[in-house]
Image: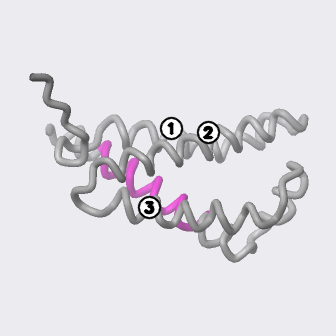
Amino acid sequence: MTKRNKIIYWTATIFLSLGMLAGGIQQMLQIGGYNEIVTRLGYPLYLLSIIGTWKILGVVAILLPKFPLLKEWAYAGFFFVMTGAAISHLAVGQPFVETIPSLVLLVAIILSWYFRPTDRKIIINNK
């Protein structure tokens, strides 16, 4: 892995981890304005606790060494949550600006996933 790719990976991964951890804690505890956001989107409040818990566990999975399959699941979960959040804001008629936090994290997810080191990827042997 080149130095450039390492820098991109760790910058995106740290940004992603901090964003998901901060959001996950606030969602799990239902603080920081998330109740209002989720209510405006028409979702039940208990969904916050579920998503927040999974975000925290996803951060742990991505930062732990090894466990490449678990990392794939975490990245996929993050991808689904962030695309779902962006689409939800648009579906209820909110301005595009409301989707920006989700889209910024989506870019970080894609960069972190794409530039992850080989030892954090699933290797398939085609024999």
> Circle 2 sits on which residue?
103
Label 3, label 1: how many angstroms apart (C-alpha)? 16 Å
112 to the left or right of 92: left
Q: Is disc 1 placed on a helix, strand or loop?
A: helix
Q: Which residue is mark 3?
A: 59
Numbered label attached to residue 107: 1
Q: Look at the numbered disc 3 and give the secondary structure of its residue.
A: helix
Residue at horizontal 55%, vertical 46%? 105
Place of residue 5 in the rendered image (x, y in percent of width and height, measured from the top left): 24, 38
Q: Is residue 23 above or below residue 118?
A: below
Q: Is residue 33 magenta?
A: no
Q: Amino acid at mark 2?
A: Leu
Pick whichever of labels 3 and 2 is earlier in the sequence: 3
Q: Position of residue 2 (x, y in %)?
A: 15, 38
Secondary structure at badge 2 equals helix
Q: Residue at x 64, y 44 (%)?
A: 102
Residue 107: x, y in percent? 50, 38
Q: Name the disc covering residue 43, or none.
A: none
Residue 34, quarter of picture: bottom right
The verdict on residue 20 being magenta is yes
Cα separation between marks 2 and 1 = 6 Å
